[in-house]
Every structure is written in C-alpha cells, then in structure tokens.
Amino acid sequence: MLKQIRPMILVTALLAGSAGPLAAEERGRDRPGDMGRHGRPQISIEPYIDLSRPERPNLDAPDTVMAELGQCARAGVRSFVDCLRPNHGPVMIRRLEACVQSETIPDDPRRVEACLPPARLR
C-alpha cells in the first residue's frame, strides 16, 4: 500500500508546484494577470481589424439608386425589378414600388427620390 501512495503524492506535489507563482515566473511570465482561474494560464485572443481598407460603398444610398435609375431610363428599362435586381434586395424594390404606386419607373425622378431612405451617417 505504501508503494501506491508514494507515486500519488509525488504526482500531486508536481502538479501543485507547477501551478504556483514560482512556476509562472520560471516560464517568463512575471505579470500579475497572466494566471487565470484555477491557476491555469489565461489566454486572450484579440480580433484583427483591418482599418486600412476602404469602406464598401452603400448601394442603397440615394445617389447610387438615382444613378442606377437614370442608367436604366437611358437604356429603355422601365421596370423597377429589372433595373434594380442586380444590386438591391427585394425589400428596397418593393418599398419603391409601393411608394411610387407603380411597378414602372416614373418619368419624374423626384417622385422616386422622395421615396428613398436618407443617406446613412458615418
């Protein structure tokens, strides 16, 4: 029975010693916040945010939508769906159709411009 207890005591002593403050200093960590809960090293993950890349253009900005509608009118496309489907979602298209009360692009662009949501502030 004594032979079984000695290895358990030795393992327990080694485990207890490695989680103590001396073991942290031996590994080169002398800052007080490096040890987390339960004596384990704390791991912190910092997200990488690339601030150098340019901001993506807002496709739902009033200027962008009005420019697309102008291109469609010059090309002879009269339907909101056919004009705006490549770059805009169905919610935006249906909102414009409901506001103008027509599925076709009106001749007066001010009617459409009044229906667009305001530009997003940065």
Image (spheres, rainbow, N blue to C red):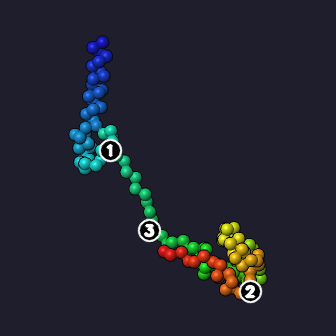
As displayed, is residue 26 above or below residue 13? below
Secondary structure of the residue carrying tag 2 is loop
In the picture of the structure, the residue carrying the numbered disc 1 is 36
Instruction: Judge the density around disc 2: few (<14), some (14-19), many (≥20) Cα neighbours within 10 Å.
Output: few
Q: Nearer the viewer, mark 2 or mark 3?
A: 2
| Residue 83 or residue 1, whichever sits in front | 83
Answer whether residue 67 is visible to the viewer in this image. Answer: no
Report the amino acid beneath label 2.
Asp
Would you identify the image quadrant in which residue 15 lies?
Answer: top left
Report the amino acid beneath label 1.
Gly
Question: Does the residue at mark 2 contact the one at mark 3 (Cβ under 8 Å)?
Answer: no
In the picture of the structure, the residue carrying the numbered disc 2 is 107
As displayed, is residue 116 above or below residue 108? above
* Left or right: 97 as drawn, with respect to 35: right
Q: Residue 51: which numbered mark, if any?
A: 3
Mark 2–mark 3 Cα distance, whole angstroms, equals 42 Å
Answer whether residue 102 is visible to the viewer in this image. Answer: yes
Residue at image location 68% in from the left, 72% down from the top: 95
Residue at image location 61% in from the left, 74% down from the top: 60
- Image coords of residue 114 (percent x, y): 64, 82
* Left or right: 18 as drawn, with respect to 99: left
Residue at image location 43% in from the left, 57% down from the top: 47
- Image coords of residue 52 (percent x, y): 44, 70
